[in-house]
Amino acid sequence: GQNIDQPTEMTATEGAIVQINCTYQTSGFNGLFWYQQHAGEAPTFLSYNVLDGLEEKGRFSSFLSRSKGYSYLLLKELQMKDSASYLCAVRDPEGTYKYIFGTGTRLKVLA
Amino acid sequence: GAVVSQHPSWVICKSGTSVKIECRSLDFQATTMFWYRQFPKQSLMLMATSNEGSKATYEQGVEKDKFLINHASLTLSTLTVTSAHPEDSSFYICSARGVRKGYEQYFGPGTRLTVT
C-alpha cells in the first residue's frame, strides 16, 4: 500500500527553527513535494525534491533521502504567518503521475 | 502563469439536491485534472483523475455515480455531487496539469460545500 507519515502537530516559537519530517513507503517514486496550506485555502507550493540532498529556497529548505524513504522541511526564522499546515506529497510515476498526500502537520508558531 | 480557478468558492445546498463545481485552467491547457476532498484538520484525499475527453478514474471507495466528473475541454473540468447529504460537506479542491508545464500540479482555491 501507499503510506506517507508526518507528525500531526508541532509548536515552535517565533524566530526559531523547526524541522517537519515526512516518511514514505510507496510503490513508486517520482519526486516529493512540500506544500503550505492555511485554513480554508488551497495548498501553495513550497519545494520539490527528486534527487537526494538539500534544496534551499530562502527561509525554507527541503531534504530528501530516497534510500531511507525520508524527507524533511526546515523552516528558519519562524514568523507568525508560518502557522499553517504543511503537507508532503509523493508523485506516483505510474499512469497519471498523481500525488499521494501525507497526513499533514499543523504548525503553530507562538510569540 | 499556471492559474487555476474554481467556482463557486462556497455553496450551501439542501440535502438531496445536486451541486456542480467548476475547475478552470486560465492560462494553460490542462490535459489532466485532479479532484480532492479535504475534511477539517485532515489532509487532501484524491477522489478522481480526469483526462480531457475520456472517463475519469476514481480512487478506491469513491462512488462514481455520486461524484460525476466531466472534462470536456482542455481548460474545464466539472465535479457534480449528486443527491448531496450532510456527510458530503467538505472542502473540494481541484488541480490541473498541462503537458508543457511538466508534471507539476497547480491547485485551485477550493470550494467549500455545506449540505444542510
Image: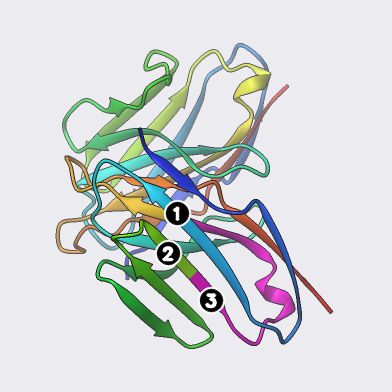
Q: Which residue is mark 2?
A: A71
Chain letter, disc 2 residue: A
Q: Name the foreground residue: A51 vs A95.
A: A51
Secondary structure at badge 3 equals strand
Q: Secondary structure at mark 2?
A: strand
* Residue B112 - label: none
Write the residue at 17% across / 40% down.
Answer: A95
Position of A80 relative to B72 (above/below)? below
Could you tell me residue B104's position as x and y percent?
28, 60
Q: Is residue B106 left or right of residue A30?
A: right
Residue A74 is labelled as: 3
Label 2–label 3 contact, CB within 8 A: no
Distance from disc 1 to disc 2, alpha carbons, whole Å, reads: 6 Å
Question: Chain for mark 1?
Answer: A
Asked if badges 2 and 3 are on one and the same chain, I answer yes
The image quadrant of residue B100 is bottom left
